[in-house]
Amino acid sequence: MSRLEKKQPARCTDLPLKNADICSKLKILKQLLKSCYGPTGRLKQIHNNIGGQVVTTSTSVVLLPTLSSTEPFINLIRTSIINHISRFSDCGLFAGILCLSLIEEAQLSSLRKDVCQKVNKYLLGLCTSYLQQEDCACKVKVDFNSSHCLIRLAHGVISSKPACVLRESEILHITRLIVQGFLLTVPCDKPGAVKLGRIVTLAVEGLPVMDSTIFPGLLLETPDLSLHLTGLLNCGQLRTIIFTASLAGDLSELGEGTIVVHKGMDVEVQILDQLLKIGEKVVKDEVKLFMCQKVIHPVLQQYLRYHGIVVIERLGINLLEPVIQLTGAQPVATLHSIPPRAYGKVKEITIRQFGSKIMLHLVPTEETAICTLILCHRNETMLNELKVACEKAQHVLRLTLRDQFAVYGAGCSETHLAAYIRYKVNFKASKTIDLDTATMFGCMQTEYVLAAEGFCRSLESVTAALDHNGGSSLIDLTHAHHWTLPTDMTTDEMDRTLGLCRCGVVQYCKDYKWSFLNTKYTEFSPAAVSGEADVLDSFTAKVNGLQVAVETANLALDVQYIIQDTN
Ligand SMILES: [Zn+2]
């Protein structure tokens, strides 16, 4: 008889934000995220307690999934940020730090939680409508006639990942490849519905970063080089076929349709006969490239190679779509018949070698939106981080097709937004009209101003998190951009040390007035500035990150009880 254990009662925590243990965990999470933020962020090593691979990172995409906690309240926040990253790739740390700062500000203030929530929501609306405005002074339109904006956007993503360990020249090289790849994936002058292509990334360990390169078409790793390629190079058009059904001859994986088995005969032999009939058919139809998503029976492989056909098996589900797009072939899911329209074509097949890896390069017959990025780095850890960073950068560039804007990076947008909100709140508060706003939140006007100040401080605390080397963060009281004064410099030496703001768009002017970050300044309407910025962030990712941060903080402030099943 099995042992019966008494069911444990569920654990109930009331008012989690008044629980010291939860509060200290929130604080640690905030410190952890802040310490990773930006180009000089500190690296984290992740390993489990049974050994295995050690990961070095500062990227939220890698870090957050590993930070699972036994505390549901922490997981609530973590999951929300992970969800944002899975949709937008970028601004995960921004959203996490802002969310935790907003929670902390609400805890520190003596205001009622519902007042903080209502004010946060209202100010989020103010921020997003300002960001959507045509004349918003912290965004720029992405100009697709020049590569400047695209390069700055990709550069921003790659340079903020210190675990990639890249020199400036290497960052520039990778950035250019990503922009080139992005441009290759946007089809031009194609009739009908526009379908974006794909960049397939292949990582090669042990080669210098500068050996990284990009090719139009598809490169496939191939373990087998007993290829009869001599006659295939530059052959014009090579007929191609792709099977999604397994050609291994296993009974369990015969694909669609039925196979008639004759009584008394060996089933395996009969299936192999069927496979060889496919072989005969493709040889007759002059196929030169034979690919299968799954495994191909060795006898069939040998037969095909004997007839000079290049055979690629185990393509996998991820490569299937790009291969179909590149060749124009219709994948075959059965062993019975091959319809004429199933055939696609490639222009040529060449062999390329990177370090110890030998690859087949499938060159498309016409311009195609598929390309392959060969990513090289000195060791596996750096290479893994670089791969994640490149995927992020590619996603950020794609987002510009949706919203053709970028926001000023390096903390300048956050300080600018904080100044804008302060101005709006205090300007309105000075008019009797805005008593209505305070009434709307069910609080006094002073409480409204206090809650708004918490919101602005939270925005600025994200900017402050960029500095890990002890410098002082300043803002100019004209454009409200972010500046850094190095540790050993005083404010008297500002004209010598401050050349440009951190995003690079505002030039130092001795007439500017200054304020240290998170100290009080007289409200002003931040002025627009024209010029090209060096650091740009994704507009779409930032707007969504802002939304996610505020909504998650408000949700966390709302939690009254946590009920946890302990069985
Ligand atoms: Zn700036």
Image (cartoon, rainbow, N blue to C red):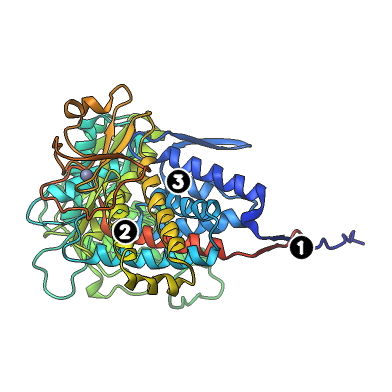
Q: Amino acid at mark 2?
A: Ile
Who's the residue at 77% across and 60% down the image? Answer: 567
Residue 466 in picture, x, y percent from top left: 36, 39
- Residue 490 lies, with reference to residue 357, above or below; the image says above
Depth check: 560 or 520 in front? 520
Q: Quadrant of residue 543?
A: bottom left
Instruction: Mark 3 or mark 2: name the one nearer the start of the chain.
Output: 3
Picture residue at 34% right of the left edge, 41% below the top: 517
Q: How many angstroms separate mark 2 from mark 1 (CA)?
A: 44 Å
Kind of residue sitting beneath label 1: Ala
Image height of 235 relative to 173, above or below: below
**What residue is pinned by disc 2?**
421
Q: Are marks 1 and 3 in contact (CB under 8 Å)?
A: no
88 with respect to 213 (left or right): right
- Report the residue marked by disc 3: 62
Q: Quadrant of residue 525?
A: bottom left
Q: Position of residue 446 (x, y in %)?
A: 44, 61
Classify residue 486 as left or right of residue 296: left
Q: Earlier along the polypeptide chain: callout 1 or callout 3?
A: 1
Marking on residue 10: 1
Tag 1 or tag 2, which sits nearer the N-term? Answer: 1
- Quadrant including the N terminus: bottom right
Kind of residue at disc 3: Val
Direction from residue 144 to residue 287 in the image, left or right: right
In the image, which is nearer the foreground, mark 2 or mark 1? 2
Secondary structure of residue under mark 1: loop
In three-dimensional space, the C-alpha distance between marks 3 and 2, rounded to whole angstroms, equals 33 Å
Quadrant for ligand 1?
A: top left
Dot 2 crowding, Cα within 10 Å, few <14, some 14–19, many 20+: many
Residue under the image location 38 percent in, 43 percent down: 518
